[in-house]
Amino acid sequence: MSEALPSRRAVVAGGLTGGAALAAAGFTTPSYAGPSSHTEFDPRRPGNQVRLTVLGTTDLHGNVFNWDYYKNQEFDDHNANRPVSDAIGLARAATLIKAMRRERRGEPILTLDAGDTIQGTPLAYYYAKIDPIDKDTVHPMARAMNLVRYDAAALGNHEFNYGLRTLRTFERQLDFPLLGANAVDPATKRPAFKPYVIKTFNVGRGRRLRVGVLGLTNPGIAIWDKANVEGRMEFPGLVEQAKKFVPEMKKKGCDLVVVAAHSGATTSSSYGDALPYPENASSLLAQKVPHIDAILVGHAHLEIPQQFVRNAWTGQQVLLCEPAYWGMRVALMDLVVRESYTRSGKLKWVLVGAGSQVLNSNTVDPDPAVAAAVQAQHDTVVSYVNSPVGTSTAAMSAARAVVEDVPIIDFVNHVQADAVKAGLSGSAASLPVLSIAAPFNRQASFPSGQVTVRDVAGLYIYDNTLLGVQVSGADVRAYLEWSARYFKQVTGPGPFTMAQVTNAVTATAPNGTPDYNFDSVAGLDAPLTYDIDIAADPGSRIKRLAYDGAPVADGDQFVMAVNNYRQSGGGGFPAVSTAPVVYNRQNEIRQLLIDWVTAHGTIDPATFASVDWRLVSGDDPVTIMG
């Protein structure tokens, strides 16, 4: 009878280190791709070679613990296709990072993050809005990241969600630099944050290895956080700024250049041609900018264990790695250099091998120091999100919100439209009010009975603010046509599964249109009704568009309640970014929803919910299963 092996998590949690411990997290002995062949590296007999290890995280989004604040339980995403759940949170990623440092003790190691750190969970929200960070209140992500001992982090677009004051306060609380070579001052065009950092490693026998880390953020910030950055900061392209700073870093003696880029690897832009710089440009960066050796990729929330992109100028194969998101994975990037000497006898390091992999956080326990440092703040937020705000007369769910008009999305539209109408003045006050809303979280639901802060926060997971814009009937139709691109083109009444009709691939969404870019539009005082013909070509799908039973004419005028992301151009939706703004009180939508429930006490879908849109194929209703 064989003896049972320890569980994967117990391997690391039990204190073992080295290959056995890390193998449980997916670590394999690397074989490195070199300029002409594969390179082997033996740390016991390195000879004239040195290996730089880059450990990386990205898109942590305020996750320290393996905790789902919206469900009030441990994070669990297991399903039929994923029998073992992932695990999230920097506390677990920290365990892997520290284990890897022990494994490679004595070798040069960098620890980097590629951005989107301080937004995304109630934990992050609470210390931005409810108990804002200041000299006495340290952000939980700052506490955790300082204990991990990061060397640098790139700015993500969500770093700007709470305004520059919050971001600068967070920056001051860190023991490492926030990098943003393409976040520039509008007047001087110089970076408003540190563009890069250079780390020098003593690697034995009097030799030094100088490694430059360049940080690049996303140009889309100019659109998505327009209200926070317009006139204060500009965001040129990643390629354009890297072409300025990589040569500068090489002149300062960098032997290797590593980029932390908050920009996906697949070249595309959710904002179309609204900006001259692509949203996802990491591959372009590798192709077009010489002398970059590796890129830690962020923003796209994808897992890329290893990818090589050939530089068009030098022919070098540039290493790319993206470690998913929320701390699910840790990137392990290796760059092997060999010493050589110039004719004058000066030491010169030559890259001879590179490779990467990702380590899985679901194999380890949380790092005790990181967990202890944030536990009190976590407990405070758990208590906050579980506080009741009202009751619901019926259970409501967003599970089918992408294929049918459901009451929980009607609730969002009702509250938004009601707030905008109450704040209108002048000629706009006489116009009918519409509202847009997207299904941000299919798992969102309200129970029948007591509703808590976390129920509402789970429905509206983004930190958007509310605006009202004046639009025409033609604008409303164009808006709905753009939204209807979300659906794949299928014919017949079905039945279809949701996956068969949703998340269509488009030129601006090569990985599929996300749920948050499917907006439905509803009326406040009278219904706005329409059919979406998913058998028709995109751009010709909206049928029987009517307001209060009358066909909507191109010249009809409405006020439309929208969020700041849409009004700034997010998603590329037509009209709303250029339409006259008739309401803007900077009210956060999530808080408006919480305040509405608190004030009214009861959510009764009978008072606001109706079926105003449906999917059709020609004139026939479409049946969607699931």
Image (spheres, rainbow, N blue to C red):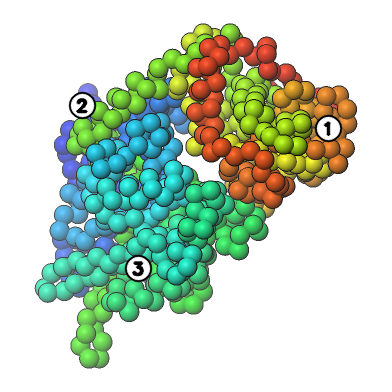
Query: Quick one: label 3 or label 2, which is nearer the N terminus?
Result: 2
Q: Nearer the viewer, mark 1 or mark 2?
A: 1
Q: Residues within 10 Å of mark 1 (few under 14, many from 20)?
A: many
Q: Which residue is mark 3?
A: 257
Above or below for 450 versus 64: above
Left or right of residue 16, residue 338 in this image: right
Of residues 352 and 626, the one nearer the viewer is 626
**Element assignment for label 2:** loop
Residue at 34% in and 32% down: 131
* Residue receiving disc 2: 3
Q: Secondary structure at mark 3?
A: strand
Residue lying at 35% horizontally and 37% vertically, measured from the top left: 132
Which label sits on residue 545? 1
User: Looking at the figure, which quarter contains the N terminus?
Assistant: top left
| Viewer-nearest of discs 3 and 2 | 3
Distance of mark 1 from mark 3, alpha carbons? 55 Å
Query: Which residue is at the front of the view, 585 or 117?
Result: 585
Q: CA distance from mark 3 to mark 2?
A: 48 Å
Mark 1: secondary structure: strand
C-alpha distance separating marks 1 and 2? 69 Å
Q: What residue is rendered at 31% in x and 67% in y? A: 212
